[in-house]
Amino acid sequence: VVAAQARPDVADYVVACEKSSTLLEVAEQIARSNSVGERISFLQKDCRNLKAHEDMPHKADVLLLECLDTALLSEGILHYLQHLRGSFTAEHAAILPAAAVVKGMLVEMRSGEVHGVDMTMSDAYRWSKEMKPVHLKEEEYTQLTEVFDIFVFDFMSSAVEQQVENLEIVISRDGIVSALVVWFDLILDEDIVVSTSPFVPPEQALSFGQGLVYLQPAETRVRRGATLPLLAAHNSLEMMFTIEEDKLTRKGADCELLPHTRFDPRWEGARVNLDDQWKKIIQGLAAAPKDSASLQEGVMRFAAQSAAFGIDTGVAERCALTFLSD
């Protein structure tokens, strides 16, 4: 629908792929409402299952992907690109987005004192192993470094492979490094750049928010002018960040790990157990398509009318997104 509306005066033909039957139905309705339905072929399938001559008689001149999230890679954009690029696109096809730059900064984000009571130990219960989506403008934090580049992806050539970067981040302010805030600049073409940065104007901002990573092995007290060794890696789907402790010990008093427990192991054990149970539920539903369809319909109704059911809007939306992604 986006592609067809982008050039309404050109007789383009669009092949639209979507795994979710619910989203595909909505897309078809939107296309009909905007009088572009006859120009779009809607396919309910993973685009990695496209058949070159059956689904796409001709190679595409434009490849448009919107499988993005807070962490950029988690929806599988590199995997989709590797499958589609070349086999389903013409030699000089335009790929949108064209590139992306993952950026970050180190911050202090702690409970501190509340009415004269030291609440530092409660920070262990804020910890999350995964990257946590946040809107930084709504959080209290202290920026301890300038913004720095972490990964650069050229979607014309980026491959599904691991990448590791050993970074030395210069500290610009005394404080305690609690977390890394991550976002990305999305380069659509030579002229247009949009971003999930908390610092861009609204007309340039994407709605995903930023990613928050509580760094391990512990919070680190730092002094201005010191450098903190940060290991950044990704496997084409997930990103991982950690402080390199062996290098940190050579920094002396300028970078010093704090003795507090980074997280409560009981909470982490409960989280792992919950994740395991959720995976079993999803696997069970996959074996019973009718039950899965009924449950998905109910979840979408809850998401659309969360207030009527007394359900928190954020919780209902996250649940719906989980079913749509799976």
Image (cartoon, helix red, strand yellow):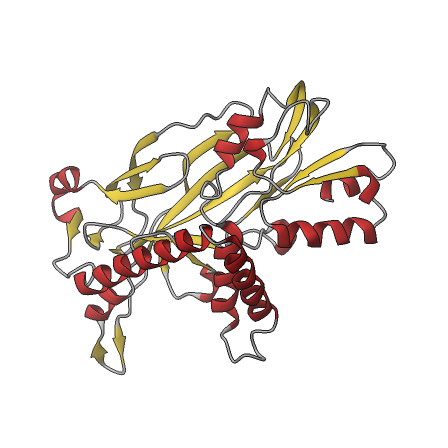
The residue positioned 47% from the left and 60% from the top of the image is 135
Residue at far top of view = 91
Question: Where residue 279 appears, x then y in whole percent?
Answer: 36, 53
The image shows residue 154, relative to residue 138, as above or below, that is above
The image shows residue 59, relative to residue 71, as above or below, that is above
Q: Is residue 237 left or right of residue 249?
A: right
Pick the front one: 223 or 35:
35
The answer to whether any part of residue 167 appears in the image is yes
The answer to whether any part of residue 155 appears in the image is no
Pick the front one: 44 or 37:
44
Residue at far right of view = 9
The image shows residue 297, relative to residue 149, as above or below, that is below
Question: Where residue 210 appears, x then y in whole percent?
Answer: 46, 53
The residue positioned 70% from the left and 54% from the top of the image is 26
Question: Where residue 44 appears, x then y in whole percent?
Answer: 63, 43
Q: Quadrant of the N terminus?
A: top right
Q: Is residue 297 left or right of residue 145?
A: right
Q: Is residue 75 left or right of residue 44?
A: left
The residue positioned 50% from the left and 56% from the top of the image is 323
Question: Where residue 312 appears, x then y in whole percent?
Answer: 49, 74
Residue at far bottom of view = 115
